[in-house]
Amino acid sequence: MLLLGLTSVAHAQPTPAPPAPTPASSTAPPGAPPETPPPKPEPDKDPEGNDFPRSGSQPGTPLRSYEDREQSPAVPADEARGFREKPGWESEDYVLLPGRAVLFPAKLLIDIAFAPIETLLTGIDRYKVVDRVIDFFYFDEAHTAGFYPTIASETGYGFSYGAKVFDSDLAGHEEKLSFEGKFGGRYVQSYEAVFDGDRVGGSRLWLETRTRYEKEPAILFYGFGGEEQATSGAGFGPRDTNVGTRFQQERFLGMARAGGTLGEAGELTNVGLFGIYNHRRFAGEQRDFPEPSIEQVYDTSRITGFDGGVNTLELGLTVVHDTRDQELASSGSYLELLGGGVVPANGYRYWHYGAELTGFIDLYRKTRVLALRAALEGVAGDEANIPFIELPRLGGVHDLRGYLSDRFRDKLSAVATAEYRYPIHQVLSGKLFVDAGNVGRDYDTLFGSPFEDWKLGGGGGFLIHTEEDVILSLDLAYGEQFTVFVTTAPLEFFHKRSRQL
């Protein structure tokens, strides 16, 4: 068959055109008019009446398919492997047959369960649904300004919704400006304006500002520390029990970071100063949740800052080193360091510091990625001079999945994460993760306790994304209980600082 194909190809090659005749040397006397050159020979006419030369007779001419009679007959795929003898059942196949029979029902159920998803993803890809939706939410063809609805859901708080308007290239150098409103779930209402630029106006100025007003009706509070304590009674101090309760907060936040930028995207370093102003007022739970209101369990006069509210201004130094290739990172690292303290006022005095390091390891062609993260945060000072709301916390989508948001709080917190991401579809990836964290009053408590005292949570989820950015993340995790988180935030420990600190 192979010989037949080669013979057919050989027969299909056209006869090379004869070389052009060498022009004769001129014998005309001087002054005679030049002879008209002979016309160039026209190429052979195509049998089908086309004007172009036969395929291959001149460089650059279009290719033509061979005549049907010159083609070898099509060979079925299962006969094109060149087997001298068709493979049959081997002894190993008979050994594996019982296992395959046992697993067949499970395989069938999985195929049936995922058939609608496969059909949906195929339709999304075929009709370019993601591209069309993205185009709808942008105001310009350059995709720099637009709006989109926001949704979030977390166990213990419920569903929230809102909208965000943004411009990601405000002054031509990727300066980002956005306005966002949220309602429901964790919030009665929340409004925020953010500006962020690594090189404002093309300069080396790094500037980030954030202004927010929010009212949260039922924030969780479990006391201080991570140890099991008394579970019933009333009038407790924050270290006497870890009964889950709720309280409401009304808050105004103003935050700014300013400094200089070194390097370019992919090898970026920001060094500067930060300032965080917080005005907070607290009261008992506003909504009806299973957990009691905080004053029914705890003596709020023993919780620093609860009864009188909190007004603080924190100043400090921050350094960010970012070598990630994009937001949906497949390589590089993210390092953030911060250190500072509150301006002494209203009886509050403490220092605040922290460090986070996240590395992204490309396991296979930027599609399978392992993310490893470690973070430490602490406040130093007399506990009576530190507002309870400023203590580092663990629990929730940003740090310890499998536990409710703010489940643990103390003067020190540490968390480590390993997360594996793998492709499912062009716009959908899966992830598997495990988180481990602990809180403590001091370093002996934090790191000196047995490993079984550390809190573990693990699970999996999905990422809906474009080639570079995360659109939506769904996490299903189990630790102390089963939790579900839907968010658009990246895997950054201090990303939550804008909400908490």
Image (cartoon, helix red, strand yellow):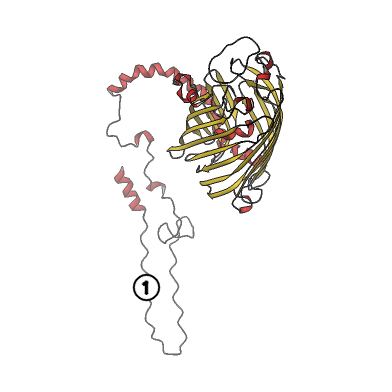
Q: Secondary structure at mark 1?
A: loop
Instruction: Spot the residue most to the bottom.
Output: 30
**To which quarter of the image does residue 127 belong?**
top right
The residue indicated by pointer 1 is 21
- Which amino acid lies under the numbered mark 1 shown in the image of this protein? Pro
**To which quarter of the image does residue 231 belong?**
top right
The residue positioned 63% from the left and 20% from the top of the image is: 221
Which quadrant, please, contains the C terminus? top right
The image position of residue 190, as x and y in percent, is 71, 31
The image position of residue 349, as x and y in percent, is 63, 31
313 relative to 108 in the view: left or right: right
388 relative to 451 in the view: left or right: right
> Please, is residue 80 above or below residue 157 in the view?
below
Which quadrant, please, contains the N terminus? top left
The image position of residue 241, as x and y in percent, is 59, 15
Number of numbered tags placed on the structure image: 1
Depth order, front residue of 377/177 = 377
105 relative to 206 in the view: left or right: left
Question: Do we see residue 105 in this rendering?
Answer: yes
> Please, is residue 92 above or below residue 193 in the view?
above
**To which quarter of the image does residue 379 belong?**
top right
Question: Do we see residue 488 in this rendering?
Answer: no
485 relative to 306 in the view: left or right: left
Depth order, front residue of 482/383 = 383
The residue positioned 35% from the left and 50% from the top of the image is: 9
The image position of residue 419, as x and y in percent, is 48, 30
Label 1 environment density (alpha carbons within 10 Å; few <14, some 14–19, many ≥20)? few
> Please, is residue 53 above or below residue 187 in the view?
below
